[in-house]
Image (cartoon, grey):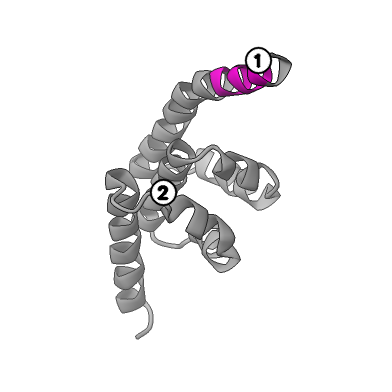
Amino acid sequence: MHGNGQSRVQQAFITMLNLALHNIYYPEISSVLLKEKVFFQALLRLLDHQHIVIRGKCILTFLLLFKLDFRWMTAVQQEIKFFNELDKILKDNYKYVQCCLLCLADGIQEIVPTIFKTVCDQVSNLIE
């Protein structure tokens, strides 16, 4: 299966993954995926996919992972490729990808206060 057929399979897979991440029936999914280096690298590669929809859905996958487990933000911050791809997408003219990027930015803005609260709570527990 090459070309368009493979892209359809990739798009279907990422759609199913996003549904699974959104509906969390398997609470350990984040830990399992964090251990899978192949998964993370494949997801990074999909950010540069030739099909716009796959790029956009991949951005949403990262957002769902960030919301699910803050450790994903740590994993991503070590990958310059992630930020390079976001920079390329930022310059993209396709509205779908731009909307996905805005969702990512809005989602991160929602997550940051929770991260700070969690860190403060952890530090308070260590001090007491």
The answer to whether residue 48 shows anywhere in this view is no
Q: What quarter of the picture does the N terminus occupy?
A: bottom left
Magenta range is 117-125
Identify which residue, 39 or 52, lies in the foreground. Answer: 39
* Residue 21 image point, x, y percent: 35, 49
For disc 2, the marked residue is 61
For the point 61% across and 48% down, which residue is it? 82
For the point 52% across and 64% down, which residue is it? 39
For disc 1, the marked residue is 124
The answer to whether residue 119 shows anywhere in this view is yes
* Residue 9 image point, x, y percent: 31, 72
Tag of residue 43: none
Task: Reply yes or no: does residue 122 show up in magenta.
Answer: yes
For the point 49% across and 40% down, which residue is it? 69
Residue type (three-letter) at the residue carrying disc 2: Thr
Residue type (three-letter) at the residue carrying disc 1: Ser
For the point 44% across and 46% down, which residue is it? 59
Mark 1 element type: helix
